C-alpha cells in the first residue's frame, strides 16, 4: 500500500482444536487479539483489529500508513507484524500467533511544475 493510505484485510476468526473436534464454533469463548512489531513492542495506533462491519465471525485488520511512526526513507519498507490470538476466559490456554508482512511504498512529491506567481498590488 502507498504511504499515507489506509488498507484493510478481512479474516475469519480461527478455530481451535475443541471446536474442530466437536463441530462447534466459539465453545471456548471470546478471543483477544494483540499486534506487536519485530521488536515485540505493541502496535496500537497504525495497525488495529476490529469486528468486521457486516460479517459475524470475521475480523478486519486495518493498516493506517499515515500513522506509522517512522519516516519511509526507502522506496519500500516491509514491516513484520505478529498477531497473537488468546482465549479471553482461559488464561492457561496456549496463544496462537501469525506473522503478517506489511509493505509500505514511499510516494515522492515532484514539485518541479509548481510555480509561484507574485500577486500584483
Image: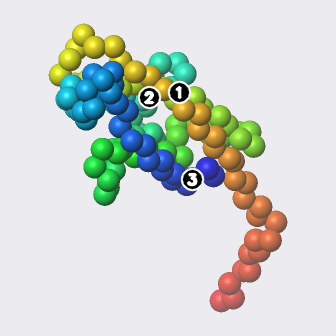
Q: Residue at x 65, y 34 (%)?
A: 78
Q: Residue at x 57, y 53 (%)?
A: 4
Question: In the rendered structure, which disc, 3 or 1, sits on the residue that comes first in sequence?
Answer: 3
Check the image and report above or below for 6 versus 45. below
Q: Is 1 left or right of 45, judged from the image as shown?
A: right
In the picture of the structure, the residue carrying the numbered disc 3 is: 4
Q: Quarter of the image holding residue 108?
A: bottom right
In the picture of the structure, the residue carrying the numbered disc 2 is: 83
Task: Give the camera-side residue of 61 and 87.
Answer: 87
Q: Residue at x 77, y 61 (%)?
A: 110
Task: Give the camera-side residue of 68 and 78.
Answer: 78
In the picture of the structure, the residue carrying the numbered disc 1 is: 99
Discs 1, 2 touching: Cβ within 8 Å: yes
The residue sitting at the bottom extreme is 121
Label 3 to label 1: alpha-carbon separation: 23 Å
Disc nearest the viewer among 3 and 1: 1
Label 3 to label 2: alpha-carbon separation: 22 Å
Q: Is the image coloured rainbow, by chain, by secondary structure, or in one colour?
A: rainbow
User: Secondary structure under badge 3?
Assistant: loop
Q: Quarter of the image holding residue 103?
A: top right
Q: Residue 42: tell me if it is visible.
A: no
Check the image and report above or below for 121 versus 19. below
Amino acid at each position: 500500500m502507498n504511504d499515507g493510505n489506509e488498507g484493510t484485510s478481512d479474516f475469519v476468526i480461527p478455530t481451535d482444536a475443541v471446536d474442530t473436534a466437536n463441530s462447534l464454533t466459539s465453545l471456548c469463548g471470546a478471543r483477544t487479539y494483540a499486534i506487536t512489531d519485530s521488536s515485540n513492542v505493541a502496535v496500537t495506533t497504525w495497525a488495529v483489529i476490529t469486528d468486521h462491519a457486516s460479517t459475524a465471525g470475521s475480523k478486519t485488520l486495518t493498516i493506517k500508513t499515515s500513522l506509522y511512526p517512522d519516516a519511509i526513507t526507502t522506496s519500500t519498507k516491509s514491516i513484520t507484524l505478529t498477531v497473537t490470538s488468546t482465549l479471553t476466559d482461559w488464561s492457561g490456554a496456549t496463544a496462537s500467533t501469525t506473522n503478517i508482512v506489511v509493505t509500505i511504498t514511499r510516494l515522492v512529491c515532484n514539485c518541479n511544475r509548481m510555480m509561484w506567481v507574485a500577486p500584483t498590488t
